Image (tube, coloured by chain):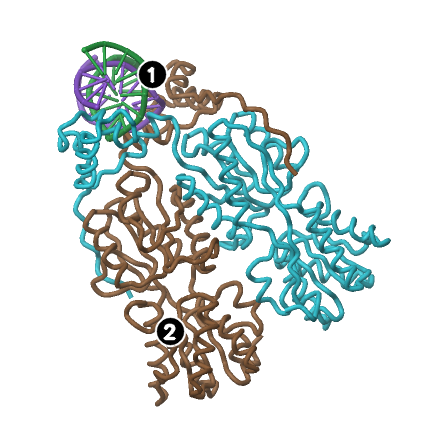
Chain colours: A cyan, B brown, C purple, D green
DNA sequence: CTGAAAGCGCTTACAG
DNA sequence: CTGAAAGCGCTTACAG
């Protein structure tokens, strides 16, 4: 099963700016000027240096440069989930964000360090204090109230960061988030428009989880506008995993209160709930309409395809990086709320695609 | 929609080892010894230093340390796809690998830089030459034959790297891969065991794509063992995306040659193919059994749930990082092939869960 | 426009 | 066990 040992590669002999200087017949300082794009350099000198750089395959040493400049050209993406998920199953929504953040970093000429953290870890200090990164992007789920203290500490330390999540009044630092309230509203209006009246909510609906709370409130507002309301007896707590959704749906069934629709606080919860309904012999959407939130790739291929609220992760990634870069450069920057969009599929509407 | 501008945080005043030295009443060299865990330091001195480190919230400056040590404590994960996918849709399989690689790096005490590349980019040089990373993990799809030249250049330059992919004879560098041949074999045996005889293969089956080629060959071997063979008329090229799978399945239908099973070279291809079959009024698995490869999360929630070959991404990530670290430390290391496992679901077998 | 020199914050061989 | 000192490879103010 194994292949033979690889021969040890020849030892790397990295060229330095002094080597380039010798090769081009200039001082080391001039080499540095050329590489930093200084306008002070004579065009012909520049050309000689550039040729030597190419010939010797020279790259500026990142650590020497960063040490001197006191910045690293690197951002750190810290992904946390609480409680920690089983090995290697990160929420796909965050993975999709990771994709767009990576691209946005490339566009901004920044390198990206990626790390998973537990909410309990001491991540608030490490990356910035050790100069590994100029700023942090925080992405994750967890109890906001316990999380908030860490954010305050970051602000106190002068660490640059941007968080993905609800934009809240008086929050420490900046955040980019989706308009969860409006997303919930769209769901409420959609379900009411389909004639559903008894709408269950699967997900936490407390200030510990502001995103989920806003989604709940938005849906409730839409019902109120139609002379209805969310029934607390039809609300079941759930974190954002499929198994939580399954358990929450079981709990809902056990309670016995009638319902004709379910608004799940996330797609994973929705998918877990649909599994529970299938097992219980309920048909989606005939017996119960199901709507999720996030528009994961899975939502489209689920059976039936899941109606959900889509968040523009591509734009979110760009905004997170751009906002953070402004902070790193000590420019003014602000939090921003992105629009939510309802995507209707067959789990709520048999006539949808 | 926007919140007010954040007040500019107070300027960071980072403590250095000299600050710690003053606070603890020792020399800067001793501080460094304590932080590097040198056994030479007196226990009491060590304690004084450690207290000062805590009190001043000191972290070793990564760039200064790396510059001096000539290594960065960082690995780089380069993800490439060719052709480049539309914005932010990376193959979920690689995202899952990314998860396990990130965890493995954390265990190994390494930071992880993540970057998307196009196969055409000059990634072979940058990360290692600029000392950003001590080694590279390469992950991606693309034409191996054009890719191979870049790998050779990496070897020539003495860059440390490990690749995810087929373990091939005389390949440049090391790779960790799944046993694609055996995976294909398992699929072939499974389909034959279910009485299927006319098995189509959706995916490239040339040496440009060694993984797909091995899967094809493995399946073919299983058929041969049963006195059958894959019919070239039932093979349609497809890259690893859902739309490619859809197009390939349409092409297969157009050809008109009868088939009772489809082995798709990846889950995404399989899911696209199932969409095409549904549109054509074919029922899976009654009319056509469908099997994929990768065991994406989507495979389980697909409708019908997709039979597939699972690769142990968690173990793969660990092996990639461990193997690379051996190379970085100039220790012997070797390529490794991981076992493949068949996961039977309803897309091939109505009796499966 | 260019060069000589200081200094970013560490690590470790050397001397004691 | 500890300190003084050199040096990792850059960037840029200073002098010309």
> Tag count in the figure?
2
Looking at the image, which is closer to me, B38 or B210? Answer: B210
Secondary structure category for the residue under label 1? loop
Give coordinates of residue A66: x percent, y percent: 35, 30
Query: Which residue does the numbered mark 1 point to in the structure image?
Result: B27
For the N terminus of chain A, which image quadrant? Answer: bottom left
Give coordinates of residue A19: x percent, y percent: 16, 32
Chain letter of disc 1?
B
Give coordinates of residue B316: x percent, y percent: 39, 58
In the depicted structure, whether residue C2 falls above or below residue B304: above
For the C terminus of chain A, which image quadrant? Answer: bottom right
Residue at the image position 59 percent from the left and 47 percent from the top: A83
Residue A279 figure quarter: bottom right
Secondary structure category for the residue under label 2? loop
In the depicted structure, whether residue B348 falls above or below residue B310: below
Residue at the image position 39 percent from the left and 50 percent from the top: B116
Q: CA distance from mark 2 to mark 1?
A: 67 Å
Chain letter of disc 2?
B
For the question of whether residue B33 can be seen, the reply is: no
Query: Which residue does the numbered mark 2 point to in the structure image?
Result: B237
In the depicted structure, whether residue A8 falls above or below residue A175: below
């Amino acid at each position: 099963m194994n292949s033979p040992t690889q021969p040890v590669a020849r030892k790397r002999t990295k060229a330095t700016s002094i080597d380039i200087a010798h090769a081009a017949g200039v001082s080391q300082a001039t080499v540095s000027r050329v590489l930093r794009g200084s306008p002070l350099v004579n065009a012909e000198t520049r050309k000689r240096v550039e040729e030597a750089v190419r010939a010797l395959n020279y790259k500026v040493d990142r650590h020497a440069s960063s040490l001197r400049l006191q910045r690293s050209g690197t951002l750190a993406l810290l992904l946390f989930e609480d409680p920690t998920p089983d090995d290697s199953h990160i929420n796909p929504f965050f993975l999709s964000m990771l994709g767009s953040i990576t691209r946005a970093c490339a566009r901004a000429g920044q390198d990206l360090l990626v790390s998973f953290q537990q909410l309990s870890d001491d991540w608030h200090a490490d990356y910035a204090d050790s100069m590994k990164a100029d700023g942090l992007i925080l992405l994750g789920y967890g109890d906001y109230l316990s999380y908030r203290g860490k954010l305050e500490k970051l602000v106190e330390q002068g660490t640059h960061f941007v968080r993905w999540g609800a934009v809240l009044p008086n929050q420490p630092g900046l955040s980019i988030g989706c308009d969860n309230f409006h997303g919930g509203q769209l769901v409420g209006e959609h379900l009411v428009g389909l004639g559903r009246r008894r709408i269950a909510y699967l997900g936490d609906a407390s200030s510990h989880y502001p995103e989920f709370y806003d989604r709940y409130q938005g849906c409730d507002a839409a019902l109120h506008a139609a002379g209805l309301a969310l029934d607390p007896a039809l609300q079941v707590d759930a974190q954002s995993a499929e198994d939580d959704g399954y358990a929450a749906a079981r709990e809902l069934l056990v309670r016995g209160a009638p319902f004709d629709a379910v608004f799940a606080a996330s797609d994973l919860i929705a998918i877990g709930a649909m599994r529970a309904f299938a097992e219980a012999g309920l048909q989606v959407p005939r017996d119960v309409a199901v709507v999720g939130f996030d528009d994961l790739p899975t939502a489209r291929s689920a059976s039936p395809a899941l109606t959900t609220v889509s968040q523009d992760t591509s734009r979110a990634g760009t905004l997170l990086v751009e906002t953070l870069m402004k902070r790193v450069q000590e420019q003014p920057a602000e939090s921003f709320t992105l629009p939510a969009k309802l995507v209707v599929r067959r789990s709520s509407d048999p006539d949808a695609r």
